[in-house]
Image (cartoon, rainbow, N blue to C red):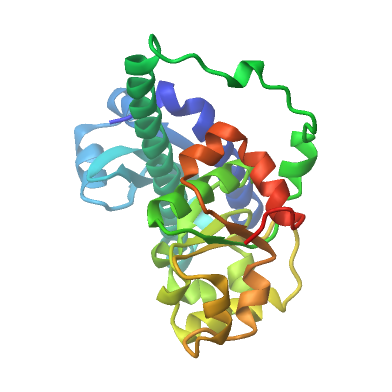
Amino acid sequence: MLSFMNTAKQFSPTIKRLTTLIERRYNCDFKYQPLAELNINSSEALKLSLSEGLPVTAGDWVFFPVFLGESLAGAGCISNRDNLTDRDLKYLNQVIRLVLEASLKHIDEIHTLSDLEDHVDSRVRNNVVALRPFQKNLFPLPENDVTSALNFPFLIESQKAEDIYKMAIEIHSRTNRYAMLPLEDINPAALAKPEDLRSLGHITIFVQDIYALSREQQTQILKYYHSPRGKECPQFITGTLSPIGTLKDNPKIVSELVPLLNIGYLCMSKSFAEYKRENVLDFFYDCLTGRTSV
């Protein structure tokens, strides 16, 4: 399991934004306790109940279990529960687990990928001379300006699902949103009304394949993008293994949806690793300004 000390820097923005959301909406104090702190501050009975996936009340606090895979990673904790209904507690349990578990999962996957890359690098380092330090970028991009402006839907076309996922994580991390959640992990009720979807806050919603969207989900997303939204509202990143031209003519896809989802259209003709190695911001810029031929 990931050590909280090794993930605290990457995890803290998620906790901070979730704390703000809960404090504003429910007037509750919120904190996250990793498993190591639960070992010190909590009884074995509490940990056992949390391990079964159940929220636990202890004094003025309610503990919501957070898992990484099948292992208990820690707990999200709220105080001042007196004014909360059972429905509020059920919603908090769902949101806390979805947001924190998704964030931990992505951090774990990024660490795994980094470890693999380091292993490969260590094997070839003595035999390969990196040319990038000697290459001069004649048209450097202002990174802060570019990444702060990526708050719109993206449609990523690639021949490999894993490259779509990696590029989605890259976009998500650069927009500084506090969680990236697969659509299938979100309660369907959250899509029912645009205001319910907006209430999820500053998150990324990831759709691995646009063809996996039901007709009802497509209509709900369409209504969301026709409703008033701000920068703190959810952002959709959608993938497709099919050429974008085929989406527009396919009867399974609501025709009005594609132009809304492909405001940020990225066509990956190479592997994600190559874009990352060359300069992924250059790729963003070329696609969004029409300099990349497709």
Residue placed farthest to the bottom in the image?
Answer: 251
Q: Nearer the viewer, residue 37 or 43?
A: 37
* In this view, 255 is above or below 46: below
Residue 16 falls left or right of residue 60: right
| Residue 162, position as x, y percentages in the image | 39, 51
Q: Nearer the viewer, residue 153 or 231?
A: 153
Q: Nearer the viewer, residue 83 or 282?
A: 282
| Residue 61, position as x, y percentages in the image | 43, 43
**Residue at the image point whose x is 44% and y is 28% from the top:** 7
Residue 33 falls left or right of residue 201: left
Q: Can residue 192 be seen in this view?
A: no
* In this view, 133 is above or below 224: above
**Residue at the image point whose x is 71% and y is 49% from the top:** 286
**Residue at the image point whose x is 43% and y is 37% from the top:** 107
**Residue at the image point whose x is 49% and y is 86% from the top:** 216
Q: Report the number of numbered marks.
A: 0
Q: Quadrant of residue 51?
A: top left
| Residue 195, position as x, y percentages in the image | 65, 73
Residue placed farthest to the top in the image?
Answer: 126
Q: Quadrant of the C terminus?
A: bottom right
Q: Quadrant of residue 124?
A: top left
